[in-house]
Amino acid sequence: MRREKLAEYFFDLSKLSFAGLVIGVVIPLYSNLEDENDWYSICTGIILTIISASFANKILK
């Protein structure tokens, strides 16, 4: 029971980081493609999403 709740927490964290990435970074990126900070934020958001989802997956196994 506790493992499932912890895995659910990390899956939710993964979903929230991806949604924040889309809303906060990708939409303003259309106005300025040369801004390096936006690209760093995108890479960080993708990495955080993948790490959170894989950690949740490992908890369930």
Image (spheres, rainbow, N blue to C red):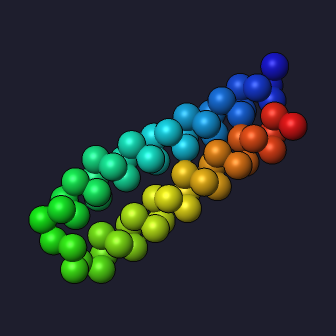
Classify residue 8 by image quadrant.
Answer: top right
Residue drawn at x 23%, y 77% as measured from the top left:
35
* Horizontal side of residue 27 vs 16, given as left or right: left
Residue in the image at 81% along x and 39% along y: 59
Q: Nearer the viewer, residue 51 or 9?
A: 51
Q: Where residue 40 appears, x then y in whole percent?
A: 39, 73
Q: Position of residue 25 (x, y in %)?
A: 29, 58
As drawn, which residue projects farthest toward the right? Answer: 61
Q: How many marks?
A: 0
Task: Residue at 63%, 49% (x, y): give it.
Answer: 52
Residue placed furthest toward the top: 1
Task: Report the side of 7 relative to 17 (left or right).
Answer: right
The quadrant holding residue 1 is: top right
Q: Quadrant of the C terminus?
A: top right
11 relative to 29, above or below: above
Instruction: Indicate whether 2 appears above or below 46.
Output: above
- In the current view of this chain or complex, which residue is farthest to the left? 31
Q: Position of residue 32 (x, y in %)?
A: 15, 71
> Nearest the camera: 25 or 13?
25
Q: Identify whether 16 is placed above or below 36.
A: above
> Which residue appears at 22% of the width and 80% of the height?
34
Vertical comparison of 30 with 6: above or below: below
Q: Quick check: 28 left or right of 54?
A: left
Residue 56 left/right relative to 26: right
